[in-house]
Amino acid sequence: MSGVHCFTSFTYSYLSRARVLAQTLRRVHPDWTMWALIVDELPDGVSAAEAHAGFDKVVFARDLGIPHFDSWIFGHDIVEACTAVKGRMLAEMLRLGCETVVYLDPDIAVFSSLDETLGRHDDGAILLTPHQIDPNDTLPVIADNELGSLKYGTYNLGFIAVRNVAEGRRFADWWADMLHIACYDDPDNGIFTDQKWCDLVPAFFDGVRILRDPGCNVASWNLSRRQVEIGHDGGILVNGSPLKFYHFTKINSVGDVMTERYADGNIHVHELWHWYKRAIAAPAGPNIPRDWWAYGRFDNGVPVSREMRLLFRENPLLATAFPTPLRTIGSCFFDWLGRERPEILKSGAVGFVVLGMHRSGTSALAGWFAKRGVCRGDRFIGADDGNPDGYWEHEELVTINERLLAAAGGGWDTVDMAVPENSQAADGALSKRAQAFLSDLGRDRRLWFLKDPRLCRTLSFWIPRLEALPARIKYLHVVRDPWSVARSLARRDGLSAEHSHLLWALHNLEAERQTRGRPRVWLEFDTMVASGDEAVLAAIQAQLPDGALDDLTVDLEHDAIHADRVRSAGSRSGVGDDGLFDVGRLHGLLTALREDDGRMSLMAEIDGCRERLFHQIRTYRTLLLDQEREALRARAETLAVKSQERLDMWRQTDEQLRAMTEQRDRVLRLLQERAPNPFGRSR
């Protein structure tokens, strides 16, 4: 096969990026043959013709002849898998007779001709491009870049070109073998996917050429030494050289941070960056399910975690015992995990349970997840004037919680320590309904959330069911000062400050008690609203499943948390004093949990608050009962007075009717007496 053949390796979740690569390459090199190496399987309902449009040839990783493919690929995460097959694909294309093979990562866009670039290795066999071509001179930049190159590889394997000569074929076979043995993200052991192996290439092979053109492989890791400029004619120069291709690595996540750091106000870099974001977001091509990767889940929908993959690949006997580890029929790896390593079985997915008092910012936090696609398509209760951005509470969850609270004799606004216990609160039908809801919620998802302030009162019912799921459950507590909450509840529901303060204490203390000793994070309302992404990511980043961070750090057209729509915390003014309970002291203790959760003295103080709250709630309910009795007595007296007034009115009316009747009868008698007798004679 004469000419240049270019291939890229990707999964269907990266299809939009791969299409941009194919489109930009086609505009510059319409004569090149574009290959797609797909490390995935086509989702149900997606047309192969539509998904593969724009590519001349399509090869599936499963068809590369890799021995024991199912067990082999199970030992790799998505990045490891997409890089581990590159050597095998390169060797196969050379065997098929491709004259020159170029590999480009799917997150690359081509801007100008690569003919001159490839011409530089006409007399060579292998063309590599380093991460950096100029040294940095300040310690922070060296730490990010030079030390990064030492750790992750001198050459960036987002690009490589190999000619079909003896030394090129020898390299391809060697690289394929090495990647089959170990293509892992394991820099502590000297391995980083396909890149670190290529540090050895200049020593092992002849005909190696190093591409030092600043217009090639421009990326966040070399912006500190590359000046990008877009001319009036639309041409793009990098250090005076035409931009050949830009590597938009880790878009919407770490790449954004590094680009912001090293673009140094260069508006042309940001223009390129935002152009690419718009290009990959354009509604073109098939609708691939979010987070799709055929090798990323067991066939029952449970996500495969990194811990599962590490365990599997480090124990060769497991691969022998379970040659198709994603299958869950019969004797399977999934069941083995449940018996032997149940803690690892839960590591593939994470469920966040958002807790906090009503009007405390729980909707803002839940909306942060929802607007990033978490729980997309679920049925939530609708927004209203009280919460125009939405409550983000699952309809089924709210229905079940309301029934649980009703079974305990109250509602969300009832000040009572009675809570539905797991063993008594619900009949079998409601329990089955809750289990079905949770099962559907977590199916085929590595990340999901629950939010309903009523959960603070019903956690004893939900926790056993949550913790039976094949997921790690993390509890996110949002704490807002009680005075702002009381003002909000007074506006929305007409509740008194005393009533709101006790509800606030009751919700927060019950949620704290139920989650103590369980994985939990505390967020302070003001900090969350002021800092947005930064505060939320700092709180949850360590809890996320593999690969979820990139999905959550997407650019939104508008902020997910609207500071102007959630009233900030305020002073105590306008809501009276703390009334029956020192909510100010409790608020201080709860905010201290952000830094000192688990400290014995702090827990003891909170327990003391809970005991005082019990007493104060009894006192408050006694006062409420007295008030209710007084109100009933006053109402009874009012009714008695009104009844007497009605009775007197009825008696007066009766006497009037009797008098009128007697008068009528007298008139009738007189008329009868005076009337002439037609049959008698006149006197």
Image (spheres, rainbow, N blue to C red):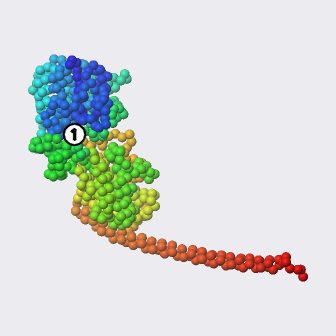
Whether residue 234 is visible: yes
Q: Residue at x 19, y 43 (%)?
A: 327
Q: Residue furthest bottom?
A: 683
Say whether residue 572 is left or right of residue 292.
right
Q: Is residue 640 above or below residue 94?
A: below
Q: Residues within 10 Å of mark 1 (few under 14, many from 20)?
A: many
Residue matched to label 1: 295
Q: Is residue 298 above or below residue 17?
A: below
Residue 294, x across and y down, in percent: 24, 39
Q: Nearer the viewer, residue 66 or 144?
A: 66
Where disc 1 sits, the SS reads loop
Residue 503, x across and y down, in percent: 37, 63
Residue 185, x across and y down, in percent: 17, 38
Q: Quadrant of the N terminus?
A: top left
Q: Residue at x 86, y 79 (%)?
A: 680
The quadrant where residue 554 appears: top left
Q: Residue at x 45, y 74 (%)?
A: 629
Identify the amino acid type marked 1: Tyr
Q: Quadrant of the C terminus?
A: bottom right
Q: Residue furthest front?
A: 679
Residue 473, x across and y down, in percent: 25, 53
Say whether residue 569 is left or right of residue 258.
right
Whether residue 127 is visible: no
Count the marks: 1
Q: Residue furthest right?
A: 683
Q: Residue at x 36, y 69 (%)?
A: 617
